[in-house]
Image: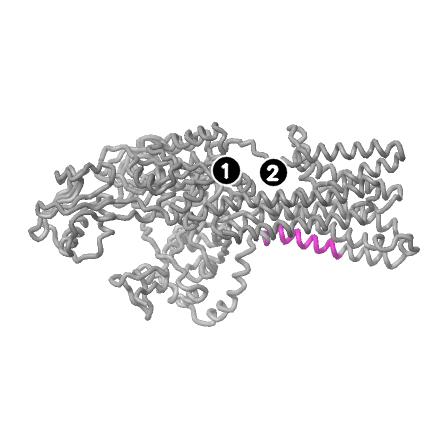
Amino acid sequence: MSVIYMLITISIIVAIFFLYAFIRAVKSGQYDDDYTPSVRMLFDDELRKETNKNQIQITEEKQL
Amino acid sequence: MDTKNCFHCGNEIIKKDEVLFDEKSFCCNGCKTVYEIFSHNDMSCYYDFQASPGATPLDIKGKYDFLDNEEIVNKLLEFQEDATAIVSLYIPHIHCSSCIWILENLQKLQSGISTSQVNFGEKKVRINFNSDKTSLKQIVEMLSSIGYEPYISLENFDEGKKKVDRTLIYKIGVAFFCFGNIMLLSFPEYFEVEEFWINQYRGFFRWLIFALSLPTFIYSASGYYVSAWKSIKSGLLNIDIPIALGIVVMFIRSTVDIVFDYGQGFFDSMCGLIFFMLLGKLFQIKTYDFLSFERDYKSYFPIAVTRVASDGSEESVQVYDIIKGDRLLIRNQELLPVDGILISPKASIDYSFVTGEAVAIEKKSGDKVFAGGKQLGKVIEMEVLFSVSNSYLTQLWSNDVFQKRVEQQHKTITDKISRYFTPALLGLSIVSFLYWVFIDVTTAFNVFTAILIVACPCALALTAPFTMGNVLRILGNRKFYLKNALVVEQLAKVDSIVFDKTGTITTNEKTAITYEGSELNSAELRLLKNVLRGSNHPLSRRLYDFIPNQEKLDTTNFEEIIGKGIFAEIEGVKVKLGSSQFLKTMTENTHKKTKVHVEFNGVYKGSYVFNNQYREGLELLFEKLSKKYNLIVLSGDNDGERKILEKMLPSNTSLVFNQKPEQKLQYIESLQKEGKNVMMIGDGLNDAGALAQSNVGISISEKVNVFSPACDGILDASQFDKIAFFMNYSKNAMKTIYMSFGLSLLYNAVGLSYAVSGNLSPIIAAIIMPLSTITIVSFVTIMTNIYARKR
């Protein structure tokens, strides 16, 4: 059996794997909102800076 | 800088109301409180992403009491099991990255919330919370307290979880996978045909390609077969027929080719064609998720109201549960959901939602009040006359026009072309077949299929989607949001434009007030302002806002005669203001204008005139439009402003006054019967019928993400003077389409010359097809952008 059969089979399998990954990503809703994630990823640093500080307990009054 | 802007909401600060806190200035206590909440919870980097991103929290006391009602809450929740609950709330204020940040960190502000996620496009936040620790009501009140008040309406009530249709993306994914792999596998044969190495593996390659093309042929292209079949059944020839025919013929011919070893077939062209056409479809679908073009009364109505039980206790009930005889409490700014009779002594009801008129109407105890009005001022009580489905407004909505959009037999430009294209194509292929059949039967079949393959109107089918998609985007960037691509075509065909008056050619924001008569000195102004303070009449209120701030004085004597005017005494000065009859100084016959006359100690001073304020650039716009279009102004008002309008607008503009909503609709209908293509530009619900009836209904809106009636397009009010440009642009878009049709026919002619002579090889098809696609797509993109730059 020639190596060409094997190589092409592998290449198709890899391609099918990517197709499967794409379909799964679409199914999970990743393509529904294409704007918010682009902003969200910029927030991470600010959050870390804050979690280091002590959280101040919120009083019942301020929630309302 | 003289004026300072609020650190939280960015509004200008009035010196007197300025609140200083933490070395920052705020325009009111509400804004300060929100800042306090954020800084206490270490969330002040809310202000880092964008300067003054906030909104002033409004007083919502009691507004969300209905969220105590479990039945209603259950309808609103997206998911609930044990203690975990998920809710999606629509928040109109979402507009910048700060908004996303604060709303995704809600768990810091309220314990019980586990996560929250923002969808910016839809302006929605999805909150997961623990229903044991917190409740929906608490969350909503917390959101309102930080200026992010969610909008909950009757529409949310029956709304289930929406199913998102992602089929097109799957189809494109599959088509691209097949197209890419087939292209790679086809290359060896393209480059070298008769080599030992290739000959050895030819069979393997070809059958693999065949197998790979199946998913595209069966799944991705399925939409075209269905559409073609439907159009054959209904006897209309649309563009999908030649497309489906081309795809099927391509597949069969290619299969035959590899079975009998004639050649490698056209599988790569077929998959590429399907892929590009699906891509065009995707490009054409530009949706504005945060806008809704299909609103009905449900999205305006409250979900619940307060009912006063017979023992005097108050409870929240669903709007649908209201029955005749119930007593309802309506708070400030709440909408009346049903028709009824007023029980409270006085109410002032703003029907702008129904009529477009911004002036509140005074009602007395025992008066009939109609659904759709908004109570301004104190809490009122009313008795219900009909259930929700029987009220005047809902009946107006059940008018046929609202039920289903009049099926306008509109043929798209592509379908129109294909009416000639399809028969011509079939004719040509049959003629060439008959010609070749006498020479060589095999070639005859080859030629026949080659024509259908090469003429498959790929470029033709791509032209419109790419042009329209691009036009939609460009218009969207200029704050003119269209429902879909079809609207562009209809826009280009319009020959009559109907404008609503109030709210459309005039602004809603403020009506200009001018003063006529002998000038008032500051002491007199002070007296006037103090007299007005005691009055609740809508005109008094507007006048009160108009006169600059004055110090407070005590009124010794105050009497308001309803429908006439006010008599008051302050510091020994007798002040009389009101209608001309009331003052008995008939200086002129001025019934047509809204005026408030002023008199001090029996001496007539003059009058305040309430003018409608026209939008900027109105005259210029009408002048431009009047050259090409038939212009009509329809108004629900009396003809008080006929003179001003006649002077301002071109002479060929028709002015029609005193039109009720139904009459507006009929007026449009009669224009259409004359064969006119009518565009209606309106705002309030009173125009909803006319908007639905017209060929193109454009609703104009001061704040785009607030509400507008069902329509084909939403125009931001600031872009009002650009209407002429938009109209012209839509025409240029159609011109672009015609030009690129010409271009794609040129490609077809070249391809056909190969096909007719029997020389179409797979490699030529594989070159012509993507080449034509790329030229067309880049041509229309460049053209639409060039036209957009022209003013």
| Magenta stretch encompasses residue B3 | no
Q: Nearer the viewer, residue B292 or B776?
A: B776
The residue pinned by badge 2 equals B413
Residue B525, compared with residue B646, is above or below; it is below
Is residue B86 toward the left or the right of residue B608 in the image?
right
The residue pinned by badge 1 equals B494
| Magenta stretch encompasses residue A28 | yes
Residue found at x 18% / y 40%: B579
* Main secondary structure found in the magenta portion: helix
Query: Chain under label 1?
Result: B
Q: Nearer the viewer, residue B359 or B663?
A: B663
Is residue B263 toward the left or the right of residue B398 in the image?
right
Q: Is residue B230 visible?
A: no
The span shown in magenta is: A14-30
Residue B650, compared with residue A50, is above or below; it is above
Is residue B694 toward the left or the right of residue B326 in the image?
right
Q: Check the image and tell me how it is coloured.
A: one colour
**Which quadrant of the view contains residue B262?**
top right
Say which label, 2 or 1, has the lower sequence index.
2
Distance of mark 2 from mark 1, alpha carbons?
A: 15 Å
The image position of residue B754, as x and y in percent, is: 80, 43
Residue found at x 30% / y 62%: B13
Q: Amino acid at mark 1?
A: Val
Q: Indicate the secondary structure of the residue bearing disc 2.
A: helix
Label 2 packing within 10 angstroms: few (<14), some (14-19), many (20+): some
Q: Nearer the viewer, residue B569 or B66?
A: B569
Q: Can you say which quadrant of the picture contains the N terminus of chain B?
A: bottom left
